[in-house]
Image (cartoon, helix red, strand yellow):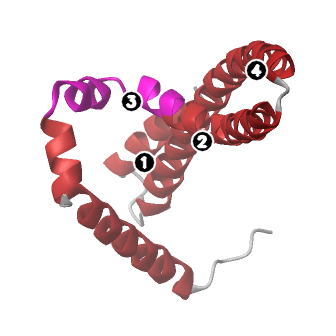
Amino acid sequence: MAKEEPPSTSKDLQELQRKLSLLIASVQSNSKVVSFMKSPVGQYLDQHPFLTLTLLVFVAVSAVPVGFFLLLVVLTSLAAFVGVILLEGLVISVGGLSLLCVLCGLGFVSLVISGTIMVSCMVVSSLINCWFSLRLLPQHNSSGDCPLAMKSAHVERLCQE
């Protein structure tokens, strides 16, 4: 037996949707965001959401390795002032090659994460749309030959595909 959801759940979802809409509207009305979105790069990224998400995930994931590399550069520069010039060149070269390898791996991971997020969003959106469309249709009609019953069967068949 399926449990009925409490009536406050749909109100909570509507309130959450309203708050998210207000947050999105405030970000989109920011003057810096508006000027960026009018630039050629902003327009290109607006037309390619997968690339935008991949770039965002890559920047977020690569912040820590780049921070460690910059810390390594600063520390080796301090060591160079003390007199270890050859060690600095070697460490920066090895560190640079290591950073290159890490960033290439993170680029691949960013593509995988972006793809997973996009597919998950599409699947969840489809499931929610299917669930709400089935929930809004009336279950039974007293006369027995309701045209909505055929529509309900059509929607169920679409959701199963």
On residue 134, the disc is none
Task: Report how far apart the C-alphas of labels 4 and 2 lie in the structure.
Answer: 23 Å
Whether residue 80 appears in this view of the structure is: yes
Rendered image quadrant of residue 19: bottom left
Secondary structure of the residue carrying numbered label 1: helix
In the picture, the disc for residue 49 is: 3
Q: Residues within 10 Å of mark 4 (few under 14, many from 20)?
A: some
Q: Which residue shows up at 42% across the image and 30% down it? A: 52
Let me know if residue 106 is in the magenta part. no
Circle 4 is placed at which residue position?
Answer: 92
Which segment is the magenta one?
39-55
Q: Disc 2 residue type?
A: Ala
The residue to which callout 2 is attached is: 60
Q: Is residue 116 left or right of residue 101?
A: left
Q: Estimate the spatial distance between the alpha carbons at disc 2 and disc 3, rounded to whole Å.
A: 16 Å
Q: Earlier in the sequence, mark 4 or mark 3?
A: 3
121 or 97, nearer to the observer: 97
Give percent across and percent down for residue 154.
44, 35
How far apart are the two marked residues, 1 and 2, measured between alpha carbons?
49 Å
97 left or right, relative to 133: right
Q: Position of residue 83 (x, y in %)?
A: 83, 29
Disc 3, SS: helix
Q: Quadrant of residue 17?
A: bottom left
Q: Secondary structure at mark 2?
A: helix
Q: Which residue is mark 1?
A: 149
Looking at the rendered structure, the kind of residue marked 4 is Ile
Q: Closer to the camera: disc 1 or disc 2?
A: 2
Distance between the Cα atoms at labels 1 and 4? 71 Å
